[in-house]
């Protein structure tokens, strides 16, 4: 009986101690049970609290000073163009429609993951389709409406920017930039329809954005892919610790990126030039921004860029491409 009474007393005092620690904002680590009782989480879970603090064991806590309010995703689709400006086959050898729909599903699943794990972040997806046809648009609508996410579906008028942009691929980029500049509130994710995401991708990007931006005390830019071509230059880099990934600073990217509205407006001329002027490489105006502002990509990758298997602009090293592809089957 004395042993039972002692256990009850220990349990009571432990509960009170946890309450006091929570009250003062401290966290307790029980390395024997492999948990953080003040957060009701295991040590291998994401321990941060969005908008408040980012926790990494054993480095401790980073106070979040850059709180994310909203995320607007601009998903650009085109089921007709198989591989832009290339005469090659993509990995898995499927129709472009299949890549587009799996990519869209992966983004929606990743946004839903945010809904389940982060409170008080407004989410919206804008789908801008480039002349894919009514049947494909119907399939897109059906897929999007399965998710409880605010959405807008836009069918691009191919003549709307014909005298401004390089071709229809850049017309959809231009359309997304114009729309985001006018309508988006905080973070903006521009993404093409051949990027298939891990379910944690956007969650990791948002929490890591808050952490790294708070540490550097400035806005940053992020990409979901560990691009293989970046390993061909052996350039020196900086490594930052994110939520569940390492993030390395880079100076090149393709068109898919996460950027704040502040940066979009600040470097509007660069974004506009990318969408309207022929450069070599095409992304040169964006690369000029990265000479000024820090930008990062994850290690390992958070998304699979479905290009040709031999393309240095596609398949990221050290991830299971087939698993990501199969996971997002419709």
Image: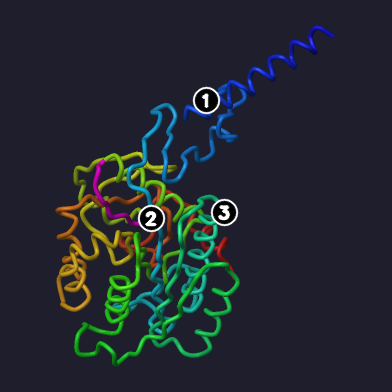
Tell which tag, 3 or 1, sits nearer the viewer: 1
Cα distance between the residues tagged 3 and 1: 26 Å
Q: Is residue 50 magenta?
A: no
Q: Which residue is mark 1?
A: 21
Label tally: 3
Cα distance between the residues tagged 1 and 2: 42 Å
Along the viewing direction, whichever of 315 and 33 lies nearer the viewer: 33
Q: Is residue 160 above or below residue 289?
A: below
From which residue to which does the magenta span run? 216-224
Tag 3 near tag 2, CB within 8 Å: no
- The location of residue 277, given as percent across then percent down, is 16, 77
Residue at far top of view? 2
Q: Is residue 221 magenta?
A: yes
SS of the residue at dot 3? helix
Left or right for 17, reference 171: right
Quadrant placement of the C terminus: bottom right
The image's mark for residue 141 is none
Looking at the image, tell me whether mark 3 or mark 1 is earlier in sequence order: 1
Left or right for 167, reference 288: right
- The location of residue 312, given as percent across then percent down, is 30, 60
Tell which tag, 3 or 2, sits nearer the viewer: 3
Looking at the image, tell me whether mark 3 or mark 2 is earlier in sequence order: 3
Tag 1 near tag 2, CB within 8 Å: no
Q: Which residue is mark 2?
A: 316
Q: Which residue is mark 3?
A: 116
Residue at horizontal 38%, vertical 28%? Answer: 59
Q: Residues within 10 Å of mark 2 (few under 14, many from 20)?
A: many
């Amino acid at each position: 009986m004395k042993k039972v009474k002692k256990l009850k007393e220990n349990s009571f005092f432990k509960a009170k101690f946890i309450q006091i620690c929570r009250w003062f904002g401290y966290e307790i680590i029980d390395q024997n049970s492999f948990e953080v009782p003040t957060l009701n989480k295991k040590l291998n879970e994401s321990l941060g609290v969005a908008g408040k603090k980012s926790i990494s064991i054993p480095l401790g806590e980073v106070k979040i000073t850059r709180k994310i309010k909203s995320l607007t995703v601009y998903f650009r689709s085109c089921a007709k163009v198989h591989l832009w400006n290339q005469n090659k086959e993509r990995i898995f050898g499927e129709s472009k429609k299949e890549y587009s729909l799996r990519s869209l599903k992966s983004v929606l699943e990743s946004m839903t993951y945010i809904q389940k794990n982060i409170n008080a972040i407004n989410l919206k997806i804008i789908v801008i389709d480039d002349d894919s046809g009514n049947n494909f648009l119907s399939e897109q609508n059906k897929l999007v409406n399965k998710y409880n996410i605010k959405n807008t579906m836009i069918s691009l008028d191919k003549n709307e920017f014909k005298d401004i942009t390089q071709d229809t691929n850049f017309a959809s980029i231009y359309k997304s930039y114009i729309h985001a500049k006018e309508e988006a509130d905080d973070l903006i994710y521009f993404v093409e329809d051949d990027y298939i995401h891990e379910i944690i991708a956007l969650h990791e990007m948002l929490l890591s954005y808050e952490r790294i931006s708070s540490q550097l005390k400035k806005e940053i830019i992020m990409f979901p892919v560990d691009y293989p071509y970046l390993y061909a230059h052996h350039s020196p880099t900086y490594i930052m610790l994110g939520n569940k990934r390492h993030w390395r600073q880079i100076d090149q990217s393709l068109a898919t990126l996460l950027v704040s509205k502040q940066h979009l407006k600040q470097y509007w001329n660069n974004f506009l030039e990318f969408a309207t002027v022929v450069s070599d490489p095409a992304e040169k105006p964006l690369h000029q921004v990265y000479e000024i502002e820090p930008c990062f990509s994850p290690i390992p990758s958070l998304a699979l860029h479905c290009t040709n298997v031999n393309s240095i602009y596609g398949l990221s090293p050290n991830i299971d491409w087939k698993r990501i592809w199969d996971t997002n089957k419709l």
